[in-house]
Amino acid sequence: MVTNRPHSAVISYKLEGERVGGVYTPGREVNLTIECRIEPISPLYSAKMGGDNIVYHYKVFCGLFDEEIPDTAVIRFFDEEFKILSLFKYQLHTEILC
């Protein structure tokens, strides 16, 4: 069977700790497993909001998810870890550049 999302990846980031009512709750690590399609790209440039150019090596296409992903997030696939350079949530899918 042919599938549109034959790969899986894990998005990881750490939530900041917070103090509520004088009690400190430490941050926790979040690991979000996604079904996706990973496309290796010869290094390309993409414009980011604000006009900055970024160099990326992979495009990852996945379904939509509700979580807000911080700038410090990384994505793991193919036994390697990559910094998420840009994340675009479209109407029907999410595109990640790393």
Image (cartoon, rainbow, N blue to C red):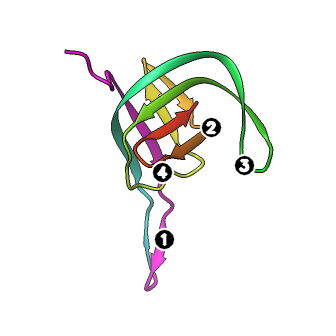
User: How packed is label 1: few (under 14 Cα within 10 Å), some, or many (20 or more)?
Assistant: few
Which marked residue is nearer to the observer: mark 3 or mark 2?
Answer: 3
Disc 4 and disc 2: Cα gap in Å? 17 Å
- Could you tell me residue 17's position as x and y percent? 48, 64
User: How packed is label 4: few (under 14 Cα within 10 Å), some, or many (20 or more)?
Assistant: few
**The C terminus - image quarter:** top right
Disc 3 residue type (three-letter)? Met
Disc 1 and disc 4: Cα gap in Å? 12 Å
Residue 33: image quadrant is top left
Q: Earlier in the sequence, mark 1 or mark 2?
A: 1
Range shown magenta: 1-22
What is the residue that sits farthest to the right in this orientation?
Answer: 51
Residue in the picture at 31% in, 21% down: 6
- Tag 1 secondary structure: strand
Q: Which residue is mark 4?
A: 14
Which marked residue is nearer to the observer: mark 3 or mark 1?
Answer: 3
Disc 3 and disc 4: Cα gap in Å? 24 Å
The answer to whether mark 3 and mark 2 are in CB contact below 8 A is no
Q: Earlier in the sequence, mark 3 or mark 2?
A: 3
**The N terminus - image quarter:** top left
- Could you tell me residue 18's position as x and y percent? 48, 71
Q: Which residue is mark 3?
A: 49
Disc 2 residue type (three-letter)? Leu
